[in-house]
Image (tube, rainbow, N blue to C red):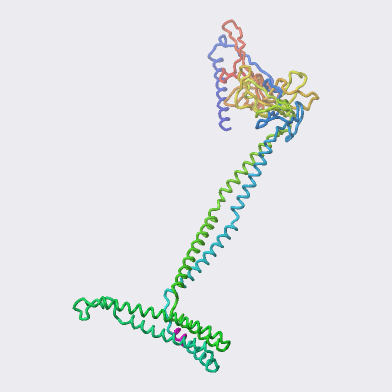
Amino acid sequence: MKKRNVWLILIAALLLAAGGGYAAYANFVVSPAEATPEPQVQTTTVRRGDLIITASGTGTLVPAQEVEVGFLNGGVLVELMVEAGDRVKAGDVLARLDDTDGRKAVADAELQMAQAEATLDEQLDTTAAEQAVAQAEIQVTQAEVSLASAQLNLAELLDWMPDESAVALAQANLAAAYADYERVVALGEHADDQLTQTRINLENARNQLAYAQADYDTAWSSGRDWESYMTDPTGEGPNPTGPSLAKQLESERESTQRKLVSAQLDLEAAQAAYNLAVLDTGDSDLKNAWSKVVSAQASLEDAQTGPSESDIEAARLQVQQAEHSLTQAQLSLEADQLTLEQRDTAQAELSLTQAWLNLEAAQRNLEQTTLVAPMDGTVMAVEAQVGESVSATPIITLADLEEPQVLFWVEETDLASVAPGNAVNIVFEALPDYTFPGKILSVDPLLVTVDNTPAVQSRASVDLSLYLVTPLSGMNAEVEIVAGEARDALLVPIQALRELGPDQYAVFVVQPNGELEMHPVEVGLKDYVNAEILSGLEEGQVVSTGELESTGDAGGSTTGEVQPPGGGMMPFLGGQ
């Protein structure tokens, strides 16, 4: 503002200086005869009035929204619920296709979905698999215990050694049993010849076994073997009689062994015969006493002889069976653990997801056999009939006719007048006596070509409530755009404005003494004729619009050209 005031003061000073210089020149330098006549100033009065800036265009009444709808997939049209002119609501059914295949596809997809869910449930349920693993672990433990027991039993049999204390105890028990038996025999009167004879035979067999055992021990514990017989006792060379002596020793040992085995068998036979004889006596005391003797003898034999080869072989077989059972149990456990670990839940979940997607797709396809209205509107056209095979192309056109719009075009030179919100006045060619108000809704960002001319395309609302008549969609219209409007405003001709700078203006006001005084003004709307003065002037003031310049030397005619006062220092504005 300060800079603006400074400039105004400088301009005023220059104007005053120029005027003073001109007066001095006229009075003192130029002779009265040579002085030019005083120029005539053209003036006008500041008045009040209306200033309206407009542009015009042509257009067509169109629906606020228009859509073409059709089925996404082709098929046979079995139902058509609407015809041209019908009003529908959003969601209303417009038409249907044959949905037999669609319903079957949904049923198949639902079955696959149920199967996928069941498979996933089985994979997620670990109860059965965990129970199988636990049972297999128990079986492995049992097999390990059985194997350890069998191995221990075999080791005990293989490592068996006579227990001298056990043998001594068994011998003492046998002696006590014999003593008790002899006591029973002595107390009773057992004169049974058979019993007596079997007892004598038993004693003889025992004696023979003792003799045979002594001979056997003597033969096998003499300290000489085959090699000792083959060497001369003097140590000077081979013994010539060694082979014959060695064979003789071997023969003697075999003979004592056969006699020992024979004596053992005879004792067993004599013992059995005596046992039967005792049982035949009918004396219970004698039977009990002898039974104790037999039991004591068996205990002594067990303590002395140890396990037999058959017992050891049976123990080995038991170990092998236990090892086999353990191997089988371990294999079963590994299989159950693998089954538990390799549950393919990821694949089951993927299958379920795929089944769900298939079901959704089938349901969508089934839903797409029904065509519904996407919005409220009026059916403008139907392009199909029941029974026809339709493709995936639009067959029904819907339009919103409740709030129609005017699609219009103006020349690109009027672009400044076209802006959203500007008021419009619409007159339809078919209804020339009615003017419908509205306002611009949108302006397209690109120029279009109309009748081979670039044009600005816009949309405007139209108020149809003022009249009983209703224009029809597609009617042509003339559109007047109100780009600016000032009512009862201070107005001056456009020629009165003097431009001081960008958007800075002034006017020369005629004073009562005829002199001109510059007044800065604030300008509002402007057209090609008038300008709106917002501040700086008052109604009724007289302002200069220019000067009429004359050519006195050439005959005194006047050109009629309007010039600014002060020698044209400020540019003349011819309009906007």
Q: Nearer the viewer, residue 458 or 158?
A: 158
Q: Nearer the viewer, residue 403 or 259?
A: 259
Q: Is residue 226 visible?
A: yes
Answer above or below: position of 335 versus 506: below
Which residue is most to the front? 193
Q: Name the dominant secondary structure of the magenta segment.
A: helix
- Residue 293 on image: x %, y %: 50, 86
Q: Image quarter for residue 67?
A: top right
Q: Quadrant of the N terminus?
A: top right
- Residue 486 on image: x %, y %: 70, 26
Was residue 114 drawn as part of the magenta stretch in this picture?
A: no
- Residue 470 on image: x %, y %: 78, 24
Which residue is most to the left? 236
Which residue is most to the right? 468
Q: Is residue 507 visible?
A: no
- Residue 427 on image: x %, y %: 73, 21
Q: From which residue to which does the magenta span run?
A: 165-171
Was residue 170 drawn as part of the magenta stretch in this picture?
A: yes
